[in-house]
Amino acid sequence: MTTANVLNLQQDGIAAARAGNKPLARRLLLEASLYDPNNKSVWLWLAVVAATPEETVNYLHKALALSPGNEQILAALRQAEGRLAQQQETAVWHCPLCDAAADEAHDRCPRCRAVLTLTDFTVLLENHAVDNRRLQTAVSQLRQAVEKDPDDVRAHYKLALAYLNLRQTALGLRHLQTAQQLQPDNKFLQTAVADLQAELHRQTPPAWMCPLCLTPTDQPSDPCPNCHAILTLTDIDSVIHNNSVNRDCLESVAQRLAQEAAALNEVSTYYKLALAHLNLGRVERGIEQLNTALNLQPDNRAIRALVTVLLQRQADAEVAQNKQHAPVQQKGVILVVDDSPTIRKLVSMTLEEAGYSVVVAADGMQALGKLNGHSSELNGRLPNLILLDITMPRMDGYQVCKIIKGYKETKGIPIVMLSGKDGFFDRVRGRMAGSTDYITKPFKAENLVEAVSKHIKRD
């Protein structure tokens, strides 16, 4: 913008101020200040037409910075600061975001122009009059408060309010959910979260939304990034033993779904409620909800199959528990080292059925830690045999074998290598590293038991 145009803005702003049109004067003078921030006259006129005493003080400070020691500006600044202090002393209300003072409460701050209630999200999310600069300052201060105390419910709530006024809805929802999770019994926060999610879904239907906590994301995610629930039931054990789940969040979800199920009596709601209970480890309650869904839809083969799997799992667990109480003569302790959860589970089940006690490790580092006494599973004892996978992350089986054979305490433990390859050189490398035998995957259960029985070190 040319100097002449800036001068015209300034003159038009002064004319509007003299005519008593303060809003127009502020807009014109603020625009002039953007292009000519070193114009003392602009800042002085802005101080005259300022909307609040805080703004008057701010503009006078800017003018004084351009003319240090100016007695007239200093006198005006002292008067403005006195009026501001007097107002703050008598104020009965302060904006929770920008801390503006007023003698009566406001649903919309007269200074930062933020909507301060969560009763109408349509108005809040379409607030285009907000002072972005002031709200960004409030966001910075509130983020510091949250970093200092992550359990500060008020700070999370205010931060949500600020972000929503700035139309940063994802961040606003996240902090509102955090506040609700910190106070799970707070009915106002529960309602606010649900209403906001509904409004966001109405305005811009998300690409995907968690069926449990209703958190929207750009793409499907399993587990959910918010409640961390596993949403597919292909691996029942992973769902039931989901240690990462956000329990407080899912407890609230279960309460909400229970109310919806009672009101709607729909199969999908009972299924979601079962999914929530299973992620919380409540198998019997999950089965109960699935049976209710099955009563409503008897021909649903998927739900019937799921109930059958869960009931069979319960029966297997009871049998296993009874076996634990029965006196069993252990044939020895086997340490199984493999990065595949499937292989670890398969080998463990096979050996335990054969009468062995099994300890597992997911990689070489974990195995060495257990051998060094950093595991209560071995209870200070050494295993009678080690089944060691060759291909693992961080440290392969050959390296692990050499380390084990390099220590006096562990060099006598037989090591049987497991590999997906049946190669001559792999067998030679295993022998050179100190292994006792070599088994190729996939293997038959009887061959595994035979190899272990052949090489196990007896106590």
Image (spheres, rainbow, N blue to C red):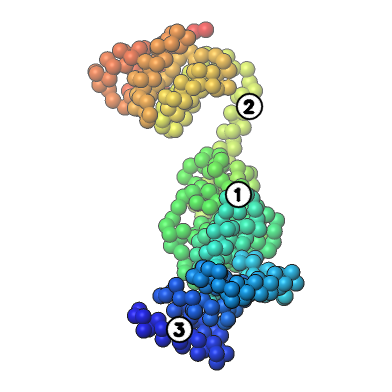
Q: Is residue 115 above or below residue 440?
A: below
SS at circle 1: helix
SS at circle 2: helix
Residue in the picture at 55% in, 72% down = 70
Q: Which mark is residue 10?
A: 3
For marks 3 and 2, the one nearer the N-term is 3
Q: Is residue 428 left or right of residue 364?
A: left
Residue in the picture at 68% in, 74% down = 83
Please state which amino acid type lies under the numbered disc 3: Gln
Q: Is residue 77 above or below residue 441?
A: below
Residue in the picture at 50% in, 61% down = 170
Please name which of the two marks, 1 or 3, marks the residue nearer to the observer.
Answer: 3
- Residue 313 is situated, as x and y percent measured from the top left of the image, at 56, 37
Please state which amino acid type lies under the numbered disc 2: Asn
Residue in the picture at 33% in, 14% down = 433
Q: Which residue is mark 2?
A: 322
Displayed quadrant of residue 55 = bottom right
Please state which amino acid type lies under the numbered disc 1: Lys
- Residue 228 is situated, as x and y percent measured from the top left of the image, at 53, 48
Q: Which mark is residue 148?
A: 1
Give the CA separation, mark 3 to mark 2: 89 Å
